[in-house]
Amino acid sequence: MKYQILLITITTLFVSCSNDKKTTETTKKHSTLKSDVLLESTAYNSLNSNKEEEHKTLFISGKKLLEATATYKVTNEKGEELHCETFPATKLIQEEYKTANSTLQEQHIREVVEGYFTEEHNHIFANL
């Protein structure tokens, strides 16, 4: 009787140890979606004549901020693209920051994108 209990205990121990890996293993899933959007700013404007709403977006995409591409896009409320313009993100740097070091230029670009749709920035970058 003692040997049967010992045999059952050992068998149970081996079975439970061998099943531990099977029950706790999970399939690892890695996301393949990689976004290279570094900064984004959006605004909604109502058009008085048509009572339609425009969605304006400025986003900076790329690996590094100073080597990135800026895209200014305007869509209507249906999602149809009305205007799209792409230019180097360094065009957003104002004249007084052109000679600054790269850290200050990156910070300046962040500030410009953040406040791009405010009144004071609209007139500065109207010709981009």
Image (spheres, rainbow, N blue to C red):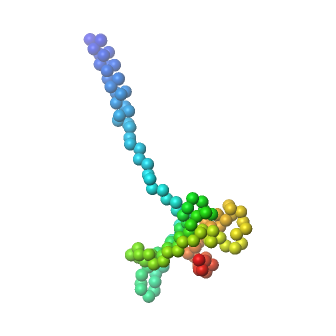
For residue 94, what is the image quadrant? bottom right
**Residue 127 placed where, x, y %?**
60, 80
Q: Nearer the viewer, residue 111 or 91?
A: 91
Is residue 111 something one can see in this rendering?
no
Q: Residue at x 67, y 65 (%)?
A: 105
For residue 118, what is the image quadrant? bottom right
Q: Residue at x 42, y 86 (%)?
A: 50
Is 41 displayed left or right of 5 in the figure? right
**Residue 125 placed where, x, y %?**
61, 77
| On screen, residue 33 above or below 52 | above
Is residue 34 something one can see in this rendering?
yes
From the image, which quarter does the N terminus lie in?
A: top left
**Residue 26 placed where, x, y %?**
38, 41
Q: Residue at x 57, y 71 (%)?
A: 87
| On screen, residue 119 above or below 93 | below
> Residue at the right extreme?
99
**Residue 41 placed where, x, y %?**
53, 69
From the image, which quarter does the C terminus lie in?
A: bottom right
| On screen, residue 8 above or below 21 | above
Q: How many marks?
A: 0
